[in-house]
Amino acid sequence: MADAVYPVPADWAENALITAPVYEERYRMSIEQPDAFWREEAARIDWIRPFTRVSEASFHEADFGIKWFADGTLNLAANCLDRHLEERGDQVAILWEADSPDAASRAITYGELHEMVCRFANLLKAQGVRKGERVTLYLPMVPEAAVAMLACARIGAIHSVVFAGFSPEALAGRIQDCDSRIVVTADEGLRGGKKVPLKANVDAALGHNCEAVDTVIVLKHTGADVPMTQGRDIDWAMGVAAQSADCPAEEMGAEDPLFILYTSGSTGKPKGVLHTTGGYAVWAAMTFQYVFDYRPGQIYWCAADVGWVTGHSYVVYAPLMTGATTVMFEGVPTWPDASRFWQIVDKFGVEIFYGAPTALRALMREGDEWVTRTSRKSLRLLGSVGEPINPEAWEWYHRVVGEGRCPIVDTWWQTETGACMMTPLPGAHALKPGSAAKPMFGVRPLLLDNEGQVIEGAGEGCLVIDRSWPGQMRTVWGDHERFFQTYFTTFKGLYFTGDGCKRDEDGYYWITGRIDDVINVSGHRMGTAEVESALVAHPKVAEAAVVGMPHAVKGQGIYAFVTTNVEVEPDEQLRRDLVQWVRREIGPIATPDIIQFTPALPKTRSGKIMRRILRKIGENDLSNLGDISTLADPQVVEHLVAGRPQLA
Ligand code: 6R9
C-alpha cells in the first residue's frame, strides 16, 4: 500500500485544464521565462492601471525585498464582485450551511453580496476607517465574515481575522500588535451545538490593555442578549441599514497591504504575516483554478475556517475572484453525527471538496457506514490541506468518500506562501498517497542537508524555496527584521519553510513535517514556545517544556513537561487547573494532552533544555534517547522515562 500509485483517470487526462504535457510546458516556462509566464497569468485579474514591471525580488541581505506587479493598481473586492455582476449577478456566490441541520441555509448571489459588501464598507468609512488602517475581525463562519473581509479590501483597510476559537487573551495580543481600534464580532458563534461567547470574549479582551479600541461592530447571529457599550458598540444590521449601497472601490497599489494573519513560529509570540494585493490575487486565483480544475458553475466547498489562511485564500478570495459558488459551513464534521459533511455534499451537490486530514481521521474511526449511507454522486475531486495525510487516511478518503473515482489533491503550503506551493494537479499527475507530488508553477523547491548543501535527485532534507512567487508574504507586521531573520538567514538567500521533505525517484515530494519547534495539532499551527509561556505564566509553575507527540486523530498532540515551584506538591487538581489555564490563555486548540510533572528538565551544562530527549519521550521512543552524556544531570532522564503517563 505504501507504494500505491493511482494513474490519472482517462477523462481527467483528456479534459483537465492542465494535462501532463501542459504541466511540463507551463512549468518550464514559469521557471525559464518567468516574466512572460506571469504576464499571461496576471491577465486573469482586472487591473485598473496595468503593471509594467513583473517582479523585483531578492532574498539576499544587501538588496532584500519582494515586490510583484509593483506599478499596477487594482481592487481585490472589485475583482471578487463587481466584475461578475453583469454575467453572473444572479448566480449564487456563497452557499451557507448553519451549524444545525435544522436551521435554514442561505444562498447569497453575487449581486446581493456586492450590496452587502458596499453597505458594510460604507459603515466602516462612517466610523472613520481609512485606507491602510487595521480592522480586527473575530467572527463565526457566517457569510458576514466574508462580507467584512471584502469590505475592508474595498476601501483599502487591512483586515486581521482572528480565529473565533482563540481566547480573549490571544485576541487582545493580536489587536494590540496591529494597533487596531475597531473590532467586528458577533453576539455568539455556534459549533457542534455549543455556543461560543464571541462578544463576551471581545469585552474581556478589551479589558486587557486595548484602550485604543473605540468601535465594536456586533453582528446578531444567535440573537443572544449581549450587553452593548454605549458609544462604542454598534449593531451591524442597524449600522448598515443607514448606509448607501454604493461604495466605489478604492484604487490600490499592487503592493498595498491586503491582510495580516497571525501565525505561530518556533519562537516568540505569533507573527503578523502580511500579504499584499496584486501578487496574492494572481497567485490565489491561478492556483485555485488549476489545482481544482475549476469550471464556471461548479459547486465548491472548502471546509476550512476563515480564521486560517486556507479560509482566506480558498473559501473567500480565490473562489470569488473566479466566479465560483463557494460553500461556507459553520459547524463541525461530527455533529449531530458523522454523516454531516456528506449530507451537506448531497444537499448542495458539491463537486469539489477540500478538507483537512484531522477531520478525515476523526470520521474514519466512526466507521464507513456514516459515509456510505449518503450518495456523494456529485463529487468529482477531493483535496487535503494543513498537515501530512497518512496513507491510511488517504486511502479511506479515496476509496470510501470518493468511491475510487475522485482524484485527491494533497496541497502543501503555508500562511506565509499565500496559496498552494506543491500539489498533484488532477489531470497531470499520478497520485501517490501521502505525497504532495510536484511544485506549482513558478515554485522551485530545493532540499538541503544539515550543512546547507543541495541534495540532488532522491533524498531527504530541509525544504527551501529558491526564488520568490507572487503570493509570498511581504513582511512580519511591524518587524521587517524578524521577517528576514526568520525566513532567510538559516540558509542564506533562500526561503526557509521549516518543513522536512523527501524527494523520491520520480521527483515526487513528500512533506515529513516540521523540523522546527512548531507543532501541528489538528491542522492548526502552534509554537511550542507559546504553550510554554502560557504554562509558566501560572503562579505555581516554575518551568515548562512542550513537545509534540503522535496522536491518532489530531496528527500531533501536545505533551507538556512541567516543573512546579518547590513549595507546590503537584497533583491531579493542578493538572486539571493547568489544562484549563492553557485553554483560557490561548484557546481550546492548545489543550495539553499530557502534562507530566517532573522535579527537573533535562538540561545541558550550559542550561539549555535538551528538547531532542523530550521529543523522544513524547514519541514514546524510549529505547532510542541518543547521547545523554552532555546532560548536567543524566538521572533526570530516568525519572522522566519512569514517570511518563500514558494517554487515556
Ligand atoms: C495552509 C496551511 C503550514 C504548515 C506547513 C506544513 C503543514 C500544510 C500540508 C502540510 C504536509 C500538506 N502542511 N499542508 N504538511 N502536507 N499538504 O496549513 O498553512 O497553517 O500556516 O500551516 O502545515 O508543516 O509548514 P499553515
Image (cartoon, rainbow, N blue to C red):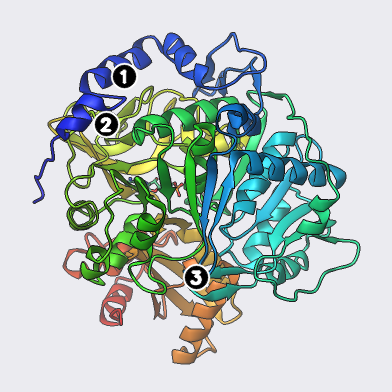
Residue drawn at 18 percent across, 39 percent down = 431
Q: Where is residue 283 in the image (x, y as percent from the top left)?
A: 47, 28
Kindly state the secondary structure of the residue where label 1 is placed. Answer: helix
- Residue 131 in sight from this viewpoint: yes
Q: Which amino acid does label 3 sit on?
A: Ser
Q: Relative to 340, is 636 above or below?
A: below
- On residue 27, the disc is 1
Kindly state the secondary structure of the residue where label 2 is placed. Answer: strand
- On residue 438, the disc is 2
Kindly state the secondary structure of the residue where label 3 is placed. Answer: loop
Whole-number angstrom distance, CA of label 3 to CA of label 2: 39 Å
Sequence-first disc among 3 and 2: 3
Q: Are marks 2 and 1 in contact (CB under 8 Å)?
A: yes
- Name the residue beneath numbered marker 3: 100
Q: Where is residue 232 in the image (x, y as percent from the top left)?
A: 86, 61
Residue drawn at 70 percent across, 45 percent down = 116
Q: Which amino acid does label 1 sit on?
A: Tyr
Residue drawn at 39 percent across, 65 percent down = 333
Count of labels shown? Answer: 3
